[in-house]
Amino acid sequence: MGFMDILEQYAGQAMAAQGDPHADFSKVAEQAPPDALGAGITQALRNGAGGSFAAAIEKLFANSNPDQRAGLLTRLIEAAGPAVLSSIAGGSLARFGGGGAAQVSPADADSVTPAQAGELADAAHAKDPGIVDRVGAFYSQHPMVVKALGAAALAVAMSHMARRT
């Protein structure tokens, strides 16, 4: 069964009556174009199917490897801006805001908790709502991590992809 056949099960509905969203998403992620996958992930993040944006970021962060965590944090810091970093997470993220463009290393990312990443996500989203699109695009390159958001979020992502194709 091709990914379009799977997506048809999700067209027009947030939850497919049949199928397993986790297994279906895995198959779709293998075959779907990255931009379509990213748009679906973005819609799931926007829709709140994985909880609030901050809660979704906490889940994604907790289930990401150190390189993915660093990439996510870099995007969130760029969106939030360095001035915000001293006012969130008890100021513990201020060290990432110095000197030009944010670039978080995997080792630095390991010192950040999922809750701190969620707090940063709230600040980033408040300053730049487009961060949701950039996170969706980023995780289109790491779709298996997205499964941590749960079946409802995966179904929303696939439903959105089905309507776009």
Image (tube, rainbow, N blue to C red):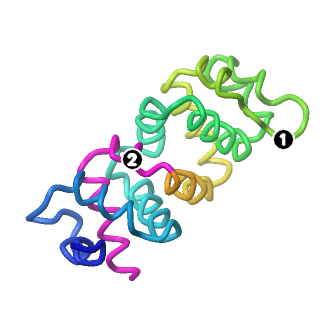
**What residue is shown at x 29% (from left), y 77% (from top)?**
4
Is residue 151 in the magenta section?
Answer: yes
Would you name the residue on which mark 2 appears?
144
In this view, which residue lies farthest toward the bottom?
165
Quarter of the rendering containing residue 91 = top right
Residue 79 placement (x, y as % from top left): 70, 47
Secondary structure beneath dot 1 equals: loop
**What residue is shown at x 38% (from left), y 61% (from top)?**
30
The residue stretch that appears in magenta? 142-165
Question: Does the CB distance between marks 1 and 2 fall below 8 Å?
Answer: no
Would residue 2 appear left or right of 62 to someone viewing this image?
left
Viewer-proximal residue, 89 or 72? 72
Identify the amino acid type marked 1.
Ala
On-image quarter of the N terminus: bottom left
Quarter of the rendering containing residue 32 = bottom left
Above/below status of 17 relative to 94: below
Would residue 157 appear left or right of 96 to someone viewing this image?
left
Viewer-proximal residue, 59 or 20? 20
Residue 128 placement (x, y as % from top left): 66, 53
- Distance between the Cα atoms at labels 1 and 2? 28 Å
Is residue 40 in the magenta section?
Answer: no
Secondary structure beneath dot 2 equals: helix
Above/below status of 94 relative to 9: above
On-image quarter of the C terminus: bottom left
| Number of numbered callouts drawn | 2
Residue neighbourhood size for the residue with mark 2, other residues' Cα within 10 Å, grouped as few (<14), some (14–19), many (≥20): some
**What residue is shown at x 76% (from left), y 41% (from top)?**
81
Residue 41 placement (x, y as % from top left): 43, 58
**What residue is shown at x 29% (from left), y 70% (from top)?**
159
Identify the amino acid type marked 2.
Met
Would you name the residue on which mark 1 appears?
101
In this view, which residue lies farthest toward the left?
18
